[in-house]
Image (cartoon, rainbow, N blue to C red):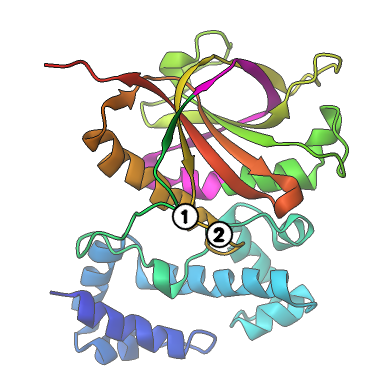
Amino acid sequence: MYEKFLKLGTDYIEQNLFLDISLEECAKAAGYSLYHYCRVFNAAMGITIKEYIRKRRVSEAAKMINETSFCLKEIAYRCGFNSQENFIRVFKSVFGINPNDYKKTRFPLHLLTPNSLPVKDFHEPDYSLFEEPKIVMLNSFDVAGKRNSTTFENEQQFNDIPVFWSQFYAQHLYEQLGYSEEQTRVDYGVAIFEKFDMDLNYDKSQKNELDFDYLTGVKFLNSKKIPEDMEVISIPSGLYAEIYHRPANDYNLIQNIIDTCYYMNYYWFPNSDYEYSGGYQLNEYCPQKNRLSKAIYMPLKPKEKN
């Protein structure tokens, strides 16, 4: 029942996004007192109004970085920030990467757009895929790369993983693994879950059940020595679901990945003859094609028949 009134408030924000926005006027546009509107907004969206405004502004700033030749100072003022320093601080706090590094890599970030409002309770988004998942057999292979930690808590992984990839490309880590920038290759992101991660040594005592690790890397070249701060993971052969995302650009890639994950977990698995078998989940990227994600691979096993 609140969706229409929330939209009245967010429409007001969008019309005044780069101006000084009065929260009182925002609540008034929605027909609520400030106190009540703030409570409803936070409960429905999962973020405060101020946080929504910050994320919308830096999301538009990221688009300007990607599409224009404006300097960061110009972008900061155009997007409603009172200084370049404040803009850089907010950008990094939201995306986990400073705007200068983002400008170098242009790897897609998890932008907040008016069409990707995180409304929790009001409707189920359309999670249809570009095509139905295929059941395939993969041969084993090794992936070498850089390992980082993230968490499922508050869906933080969807903010962290784009940053891991931005760092991977900004630091040219693939060159340390034997690949040139021009060389045709497929990059792999590997989600590492604790119960399957028995062959690698790290401190499990600091992790909770929502934490997991994510490796950004490439197919391992046996002739190349691996730097000390990187590692090699062996992807086992077996049965996998091969899932292709809907066509994406720099601005909706992350949202498409989120939609794909929801589709698989909340629709495909409950209605298929297969279940997740445990193990590494893979995400393929094609850097020669704007670094857009090619496919996700999820390990499977047939469901036991009752």
Spot occupied by residue 163 in the image (x, y as percentages of width and height) = 62, 47
Amino acid type assigned to the residue bearing label 2 in the image:
Ala
Q: In which quadrant is the N terminus drawn?
A: bottom left
Q: What residue does disc 2 label?
A: 248
Q: CA distance from mark 1 to mark 2?
A: 7 Å
- The number of numbered badges drawn on the structure is 2
Q: Residue at x 29, y 64 (%)?
A: 119
Q: Are marks 1 and 2 in contact (CB under 8 Å)?
A: yes
SS class of the residue under badge 2?
loop
Amino acid type assigned to the residue bearing label 1 in the image:
Asn
Along the line of sight, which residue is nearer the eye, 231 or 49? 231
Along the line of sight, which residue is nearer the eye, 199 or 126? 126
Q: Residue at x 50, y 15 (%)?
A: 197
Circle 2 packing at 10 Å, graded few (<14), some (14-19), many (20+), is some
Spot occupied by residue 277 in the image (x, y as percentages of width and height) = 36, 19
214 left or right of 126 in image:
right
Q: Is residue 54 above or below residue 252?
A: below
Q: Is residue 173 above or below residue 118?
A: above
Pointer 1 or 2: first along the chain: 2
Q: Is residue 284 above or below residue 196?
A: below
Along the line of sight, which residue is nearer the eye, 119 or 30? 119
Spot occupied by residue 58 in the image (x, y as percentages of width and height) = 57, 70
Asked if one can make out residue 205 in the rendered structure from this viewpoint, the answer is no
SS class of the residue under badge 1?
helix
Q: What residue does disc 1 label?
A: 256
Which contiguous range is marked in magenta? 137-161
Q: Residue at x 85, y 30 (%)?
A: 176
